[in-house]
Amino acid sequence: MILAVDIGGTNYSLALGTPDGRILERTTGSTDRSGGAQWMIERVLMVGRRLIASSPEAVTACGISFGGPVDFASRRIVNSTHVAGWDNLAITETIQRALGTPAVVDNDANAGALGELTFGAGRGCRHLIYYNIGTGIGAGIIIDGEIYRGANGNAGELGHVPVLPDGPLCDCGNRGCLEALSSGTAIGRRGEEAVREQPRRAGGIRQAANGPVTAKAVFDAARTGDGLALELVDETCRYLGMGVAAAMNALAPEAIVIGGSVAKAGRVLLERLRKQTDRFLMPVHRPHLKIIPARLKGNSGLLGAVALAAASGGENQAAG
Amino acid sequence: MILAVDIGGTNYSLALGTPDGRILERTTGSTDRSGGAQWMIERVLMVGRRLIASSPEAVTACGISFGGPVDFASRRIVNSTHVAGWDNLAITETIQRALGTPAVVDNDANAGALGELTFGAGRGCRHLIYYNIGTGIGAGIIIDGEIYRGANGNAGELGHVPVLPDGPLCDCGNRGCLEALSSGTAIGRRGEEAVREQPRRAGGIRQAANGPVTAKAVFDAARTGDGLALELVDETCRYLGMGVAAAMNALAPEAIVIGGSVAKAGRVLLERLRKQTDRFLMPVHRPHLKIIPARLKGNSGLLGAVALAAASGGENQAAG
């Protein structure tokens, strides 16, 4: 039996999972950001102990998906941009000491990629790219059935492909990254701007939002055919298409899987994304383009943590 | 002993090489484009026969680097954008039949990447990206010491990463590809435009060109400190920097090797390219950035053909 942990800036989940991807029991809650890393670790240990006690079989490994940069080789969290106290934290050691199970940790995009590859939309693929489009844009690259980490352990940062030379400032410090133009946060911000600048066309988005403009409101309005919202979705998909085409031209994967909260927009997003990607794709790659939605929904990271723990036997391998 | 063949749109070379990268004898000539594929194949067979006859040891394999798209799995040339008659040509069968040696063929960017990895600037690297910046921009991606081909055999097209949404038309049919902005052809074209539009600042480039404006003239003028030429080089490197940063963020290689005729520009190009790439790179990747010039110069492809033949024993492997 595997203990799976998914730590995000908004929510967290813990579950008992089997190596073949069944979830026996799952606990979810809201992250108390003000409590910092300390609060979260106490929650994880408490819920973890309870799940281990209730498990019908011995829990032999723990897999952790973390919503922030992770140093896979040294099994440490690098930091969190949302919650304090995570800097250089050896969470796997804490788990091992407190719960007695070896643990492995990876960032949520890599975990999501592995989850979708092993149990979801990417089953049977050898080469796969997974995008997690939510607050930011994370990505995981699967090459030959394994997460590709590169020489320094930080490969797969496809959210930071530059798509507009002097574009908006990104959280990473650069300008014009894909994330700064097409993440949920960026779509909400551009929606807010559009509503302010074109008040006479903003009725649909305003109604869908019923408060501050979010990415969800933009997509909800777009789904009803709202003109301004559709323009925002088209712009979003144009930059996403540039980024996805760059990744496809470079890596020629069998499939590109789109997950994260923005992927909930469904067809209104995916159809436009396919069209825009096709536009920027080399002709030789066009017949092979396959952009599909994630299948595990909110559980990509959690089931990726299961797969990670099952594959490693609880121990992180050397990164390169 | 290996027979190495490098077929380009401007020049061709044949050589006798050893598996450890020594070249015993080399023949080079200009490609007669008007003669088409037929002329070139006759040249290759004639020079090949002569080299085999003069070889001190038996020639057991032939490696071919081709300046155009190749279907590695089926050992065929796909086509040539410069020379007629190459469509779907099984050059390896022709060689095997006429010269009696098994043969392997790959495109010049993949061959160059393998050459630099095995015998040149990339020796000792596990993960490497090689750019061939000349008439176009080709690239080869090395992952775990091997050319990465992706699911459809066409991975590595980093010259067709979109860097400017509505940029100039590219040979591939799309707009705003890196190749359409920063290849030798593109630099020459932008140089020509700049000279026409800003005649009072064009003296330096005009003098360096002494005829039609080429990329070489732009770099020669830039090296003397010419203001207009330096602006063109800066613009070239801005787009190259976007493309290289995208590739580095995605793949985190140990080194990025720059070859091809444009790389002859040397420091005036490489220093600016490093600066611009750094600007677009995620902070976590910055300490690992290593952009280095190709070391095998005109022989990257030829020595790549040697490495290809040595690795395969003359037979193309399945592409995946």
Image: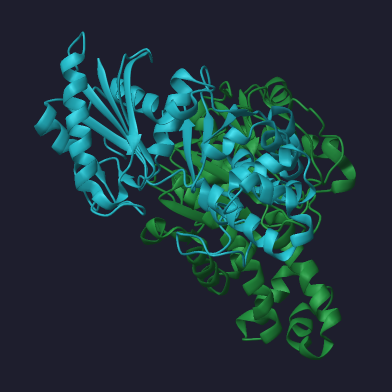
Chain colours: A green, B cyan
Q: Is residue A130 visible?
A: yes
Image spot of residue A308 (x, y percent): 54, 34
Q: Quadrant of the N terminus of chain B?
A: top left
Image spot of residue A29 (x, y percent): 73, 51
Q: Is residue B316 visible?
A: no
Q: Quadrant of the C terminus of chain B?
A: top left
Image spot of residue A199 (x, y percent): 83, 87
Looking at the image, residue B75 lies above or below residue A30: above
Q: Quadrant of residue A55?
A: top right
Q: Quadrant of residue A317?
A: top right
- The one nearer the camera, B193 or A181, is B193
With A104 as the anchor, is A31 left or right in this view? right
- The one nearer the camera, B70 or A15, is B70
With A42 as the anchor, is B173 left or right in this view? left
With B99 as the anchor, is B220 left or right in this view? right
- The one nearer the camera, B57 or A272, is B57
